[in-house]
Image (tube, rainbow, N blue to C red):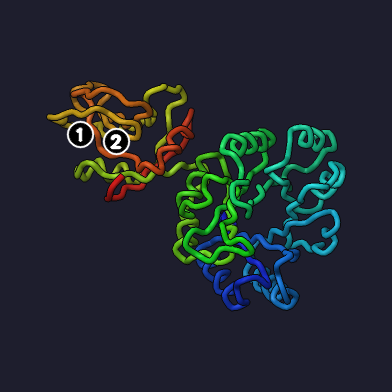
Amino acid sequence: MENGNGISIYAGLNCSLEENITLMETAASLNLNRIFTSAAIPEAVDTNFDFAAILTFAIENNFEIIVDVTPLTISNFDFEQFVLRLDDGFAPIQIAALSHFRNIMLNASTVNEKLLLELVELNANFDNISALHNFYPHIYTGLDVDYFSHQNNLLHKFGILVGAFVASLNGRRRPPFEEGLPTLELTRNLSTDLSSRYLTALGTDFIIISDALPTPQECIALSKITPQIITLETQLLIEEPLILDILSNNPFLSRPEISPHVIRAADSRHFFKNVDILPDNNPQPRKRGDIIIDNSNFGRYMGEIQIVKTDLPPDPRVNKIAHVFNDNLPMIDCITSNTSFSFRLLTGSI
């Protein structure tokens, strides 16, 4: 698949068939090639014709179709085009058997190590197993950040890719509550872009917009999310073209060792081998979220780019070049050993 991210389509709710087809056309044009859907929504009406038309369009346009199934409904979706997202209630032996002849997704929000170890013992085909979290229509019931991160780490330990849902903030939210369908409660009323970048920072491999009709802008934002790279939006503090070009156009990798005070961009110094970075005549205290660069006063460290984790005093050997926007600051704590990160440089208030 060109892009592991995707959208959700619900027949018989608050979107017409034409609106759903238009959304899928938009998604296809952006290489958002996954569709999550369900044929068993209590609030849906007159779904049969719309659901068949949606599935036909999705299959013809090479979408991967993820269908949430229970032990009672699984027989309704016995087609190769469907990836079965197994809700709770399947026995380990059933899961292991299914994994040998089709792609399945575990419930990432409820899976535990005991089940995963049983699947190992049952010789499940882990090449056909991924996982997808729940979404939570009921406000305040979405997952806790630490629990979410723990579940992702557990699944990664077994080599399983993990997906999660983000809500649409500016589009049409799904009934009956229309309060968003996030996996992580913290993101319920954040932008789709920020929510997606935060889930990526927490180790999510693919992301699906769960609400009924996201805006084209939200789909575009999701299409630009890169797995395994934490993207920080930052406010520019200088106008030095070379530094700004390097910040804008290069992913960085944090060094393997961890400092309590700064995140060090490995190999950032090589960008400035033949450049003299002049000191700032008025060095300022360094605040959490500042992006800094060592200047010529720091000798062989000149050109090292860092992100400040804790407030630090001014240093004439260090220049401040940008600052992470306040709503992006939690993602700094997700940058640990050998973590890829990049900067999205913007203007405006932090």
Please determine whether, in this image, residue 204 is positioned above or below residue 30: above
x, y percentage for residue 76?
Answer: 82, 64
**Alpha-carbon span between mark 1 and mark 2:** 8 Å
Q: In this view, does 131 lie to the left or right of 179?
A: right
Secondary structure, mark 1, is: loop
> What type is the residue that disc 1 sits on?
Val
x, y percentage for residue 229?
Answer: 47, 42
Please determine whether, in this image, residue 231 is positioned above or below residue 301: below
Q: Specify the quadrant of the image occupied by residue 57.
A: bottom right
Q: In which quarter of the image is the C terminus?
A: top left
Q: Camera-side residue: 150 or 120?
A: 150
Q: Specify the quadrant of the image occupied by residue 258.
A: top left
> What type is the residue that disc 2 sits on?
Phe
Q: What is the crowding at mark 1: few (fewer than 14 residues within 10 Å), some, or many (at least 20)? A: few
Q: Is residue 339 left or right of residue 13?
A: left
Residue 271: which numbered mark, if any? 2
Secondary structure, mark 2, is: helix
Q: Which residue is drawn at 55% across and 74% down?
A: 22
Q: Residue at x 67, y 41 (%)?
A: 160
x, y percentage for residue 227?
Answer: 52, 46
User: Pointers 1 and 2 in contact (CB under 8 A)?
Assistant: yes
Q: Camera-side residue: 46 or 235?
A: 46
Q: Which residue is drawn at 56% across and 57% down?
A: 179
Q: In this view, does 27 lie to the left or right of 49?
A: left
Q: Can residue 269 be seen in this view?
A: no
Please determine whether, in this image, residue 209 is positioned above or below residue 245: below
Q: Which residue is drawn at 48% across and 65% down?
A: 215
- The residue pinned by badge 1 equals 275
The residue positioned farthest toward the left in the image shown: 281
